[in-house]
Amino acid sequence: MKAYQQQWVENAYLQAKAQNWFEKGLLTEQQNTDIKKQFIIDYYQPNVFIKIALFLFTSLCCTFACSLLLLLFSASSLDSILKGVSTLSLFFAALSVLLLEFLIKEKKVFQSGIDNALIYFSIGSCCTFLYYQLEPLHLPAWLEFSFILPFFIVAYIRYADVFVACVIYFLLVMILVDFSLTFSVGKTLLPFIMLFFSLGAYYFVEKLKQRADYLYYETSLDIFKTLTLASAYLSVNYFIVREGNAMINKVITSVAPQIGLAPLFYLFTILIPIAYIAFGLKKRDRTFLVLGLLTAAFSFFTYRYYFGIIPTEIALLICGTLLIGAASFIIHQLKQAKFGFTYAPDNNYEGLNLDTILLSELVNTKLHSNDENLKFGGGSTGGGGAGGEY
C-alpha cells in the first residue's frame, strides 16, 4: 500500500541518528562513515529551496496543461463545458497518478516537491470530477465532504503526506459539525460532541504508534496529534463556544449573549491548559507542553476579552516582558540537565530500537575487520589450531 520504500525512511532516520551521535562525540568519523555506507539513502530529496521551486514548477506545468486542453471547449455550450471539465479532471487525475508512481519507482523521488505537487493535483482533479457529478443532486455539505474524504484517506495511506493528513482532519471536523447542526440537539451538544471526537481521534493516533511502520507516518501523525489536542481545547473554550453559539443562531449584537453552562466552560478554559502543561512535564512530551503554553495564552485572551481592565497594548507589553524573561531564565537553567529536563534537542524515536541497530552495525564492522587478521594454526580434525594428528 505504500508508494515509498519503508527502508528509505528508516535509513534516513538511522543516518541522522548516527550523525547526531558523531557530533556529540559518541562515534568516530570512521564509524559514522561505515554506518552511512551500510544504511544507504538512494532516493532523490533536494534541499528546501529546490523543493519549493520544483513544487511550483510542477504545479504550473499541470495547470497550464489543464488550461490548454480546456480551451478546446471554450466555444461550446455551458453543458458541454461542464462535461468537458469533468472528463478532463478524471483524465488528468489518472495521468498524474501514473506519472507520480513512475517517478517514485524509477526516479526514486521522495518528498521532493515534484511528487507533492502531483499528489495534490491528482486529488484536486478527483474532487473536481466528483463535484460535477454531485452538484446537480444538491446534497448537504456534510454528505459531499463524505464523498470527497476517501480520496484523501487513500492518498494519505499510500504517500503519508502531511498536508493531506491536515485536510483529512479538517474534513472530519466539517462533516461532524455540519451534520450536528442539522439537529437542534446537535447544536446544543456541539461543544461536547467535538470534545469527545477530538479525544477519540487522539486515542486512535496513540494506537497507531504501536504499528511497526509508524516511522513511515511519524511526521504526519505528529501533526494529527497536535490538531486533535488543539481542537479538544477549542471545542470547549468559553470564547469559542460563546461566539460560535451567536454565529450559529445568527445573533448580531456588539457582545455575544451569555450561554448556558457558562461556569463549566470557564472551568474547561482554565483546567485544560494546566492539564496539558502538567502532562507534558510529566511525560517529557514537547507537543503537550507547547500546546499547554499556547492554550494558556488563549485562555488569558478569553478572560481579558470579556473582563479586560487595562489597555490592550499595556497588557501585551507586560505579558511579553514576563514571557521573554521567563524563557531566558529557563533556557539558562536547563543548559545543563536538571530534574530530567534539558534545553538540548532530543530526537530519539522509540518506535525503532535505533541504539541496538547502530551498535549491532558497529560490532559487526569490528568483527569483520578482526576476522581478516585471525588465522588458526595446524590440526587436521577439530583441533582448533592444535598441532599434530588427532
Image (cartoon, rainbow, N blue to C red):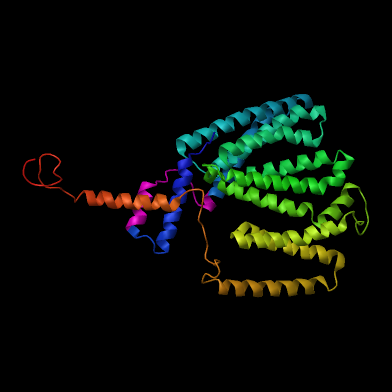
| The magenta segment | 30-50
Compared to residue 160, the image places residue 48 above or below, namely below
Residue at horizontal 39 percent and vertical 62 percent from the top? 26
Residue at horizontal 91 percent and vertical 47 percent from the top? 249
Which quarter of the picture shows residue 66?
top right
Which quarter of the picture shows residue 138?
top right
Compared to residue 57, the image places residue 130 above or below, namely above
Q: Nearer the viewer, residue 41 or 385?
A: 385
Residue 12 in the image: x percent, y percent? 46, 49
Residue 21 in the image: x percent, y percent? 42, 59
279 in magenta: no
Residue 380 visible in the displayed image:
yes
Residue at horizontal 42 percent and vertical 46 percent from the top? 41
Q: Would you say 365 lies left or right of 132 here?
A: left
Residue 50 in the image: x percent, y percent? 52, 50
Residue 11 in the image: x percent, y percent? 44, 47
Residue 294 visible in the displayed image:
no
Outermost residue toward the front in this view: 390
Q: Would you say 22 lies left or right of 311 here?
A: left
Q: Quadrant of the N terminus?
A: top right
Q: Nearer the viewer, residue 175 or 363?
A: 363
**How many labels, in total?**
0
Q: Would you say 255 lies left or right of 114 here?
A: right
Q: Quadrant of the C terminus?
A: top left
Q: Would you say 371 lies left or right of 272 here?
A: left
Residue at horizontal 39 percent and vertical 47 percent from the top? 39
